[in-house]
Amino acid sequence: MPVPSFIVELRKHVGTAPLWLSGATAVILDGRRVLLVRRADSGDWSPVSGIIEPGEEPGVSARREALEEAGVHVRVDSLAEVNVTDTYTYPNGDIAQYLNFTFRCTYLSGDAAVGDDESLEVAWFDLDDLPDLRADYRARIAIAIAGDVKTRFVR
């Protein structure tokens, strides 16, 4: 589902005005490989990510997004980072900014494949041979694989 129903309802009232939302990023690891999706909205490769539903725990959201977007079951191992994203303006004019929770996750099972219309491709990449990534996506992966015991709070 590209836009959660609660956001569709909010947009009826606020139009394209900026929304403050919560997001979860799942950096999914299988040994020295990381699972990435090519986003349908931008064409960028990125870790699996999505909007946290109302009342949903962030780690549960990361697991749900991994299954919905990439068809894989994961274990959420740790919270690697909490940050505020830049403001995004989507092609339809909607504006949003996210409080993002990045989780280090371990692949458990499933055949990685496009699971919904949010992604164009899903692929495993060796950590030493990543595709071209936006700096913020590359940073989320680096922080997650660092294996720090403490969560990194940006700023």
Image (cartoon, rainbow, N blue to C red):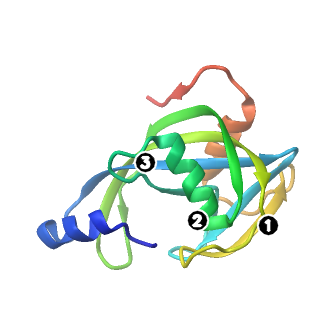
Q: Which residue is mark 2?
A: 68
Q: Could you tell me if residue 101 is visible in this image? A: no
Q: Earlier in the sequence, mark 1 or mark 2?
A: 2
Instruction: Name the outermost residue toward the left.
Output: 13
Query: On the picture, is 73 further left or further right than 59?
Result: right
Q: Nearer the viewer, residue 40 or 63?
A: 63
Q: Earlier in the sequence, mark 3 or mark 1?
A: 3
How far across and how far down the image is residue 77, in percent? 67, 34
How far across and how far down the image is residue 75, in percent? 69, 42
Q: Secondary structure at mark 1?
A: loop
Q: Earlier in the sequence, mark 3 or mark 2?
A: 2
Query: On the picture, is 126 further left or further right than 25?
Result: right
Q: Which mark is residue 96?
A: none
Residue at 62% x, 57% y is 66
Q: Quadrant of the C terminus?
A: top left
Q: Which residue is mark 1?
A: 111
Tag 2: amino acid: Glu
Residue at 43% x, 48% y is 85
Confirm or deny contact between disc 3 and disc 2 (CB under 8 A). Answer: no
Query: On the picture, is 132 further left or further right than 13?
Result: right
Q: Which residue is mark 3?
A: 85
- The Cα atoms of the two marked residues, 1 and 2, are separated by 12 Å
Q: Answer with the quarter of the image where residue 99 lies.
A: top left
